[in-house]
Image (cartoon, helix red, strand yellow):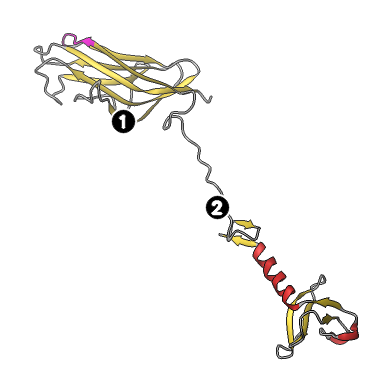
Amino acid sequence: MKLNPRSTYYVGQDSSGRMIGVPTGTAPGNLATSYGGGGNAVGTGSWGGVALNQTANGLLELSNLHNTLLVNGQLIGTGTGDSGSGKNPDTVIKKPWLDAQDGAVPFDQQTAAPLGAIGTTVTIVSITIPTGYDGVINAYSWNFTGGGFVQGSGDLVAKVLRNGVPVRNYDKILTEKGSPQIARPIAPLRIYSNDIISLTVTHVANVMLAGNLIGSFVGWFYPSAS
């Protein structure tokens, strides 16, 4: 149906979806709207329509629009006091090998052993992961306390072993790393239930080397998820 904008004021729709209009200039509180044949949408006086208050109906429509607010294409917020709805909270799943959680058991194992003769290998430090736990090593160290060692010469070669097998990228360490006081941070080295992780040093050459080897592993165990 089409209303004449010069003579009719549009105030909304009824329960059937039909437009409601009143004559322009009609005083609030004295309005009546009805529907006759032939598409006439505006009625007054004796048509027996429903009494309207133009100002109140306009405010009602505005209120309804306000109470249904689409926010960021995500949420429907309702209520007259809020201009929008809060963002859905992000779900964060922390990885236990990156963030120590409840139930984690920290360790900082440090030991020392004398350097062996040329051709021998010494295990400086070794840890066994408890049954039912996994873990992570995120720092380690090894040092030689005697004099005469040239860093990178290959006279001493350190390795990190998992169950006797060298760990990739830690299978030929030619320089000292960190210290027992300040261990060297590394990318998290994940370890698993019943693994045996060892740090060894092989005396490859230079008969003049004599002294102690010291080493450490730093990290934590956490209850296994499997």
Is the residue 29 above or below the residue 116 in the image?
Answer: below
Does label 2 or label 1 sit earlier along the sequence?
2
- Which residue is found at the position 62% from the left and 59% from the top? 81
Query: Chief secondary structure of the magenta span?
Result: loop
Residue 95's disc is: none
What residue would you read off at disc 2? 87
Coordinates of residue 70 in the picture (x, y in percent): 61, 61
Coordinates of residue 94 in the picture (x, y in percent): 48, 35
How many numbered tags mark residues here? 2
Q: Nearer the viewer, residue 127 or 117?
A: 127
Label 2 sits on a secondary structure element that is: loop
What residue would you read off at disc 1? 186
What amino acid does circle 1 point to?
A: Ile
Label 1 sits on a secondary structure element that is: strand
Q: Nearer the viewer, residue 221 or 17?
A: 17
What amino acid does circle 2 point to?
A: Lys
Relative to 29, 132 lies left or right:
left
- Which residue is found at the position 10% from the left and 12% from the top? 207
Range covered by the magenta-colored residues: 113-118
State the image quarter where residue 195 is shown.
Answer: top left
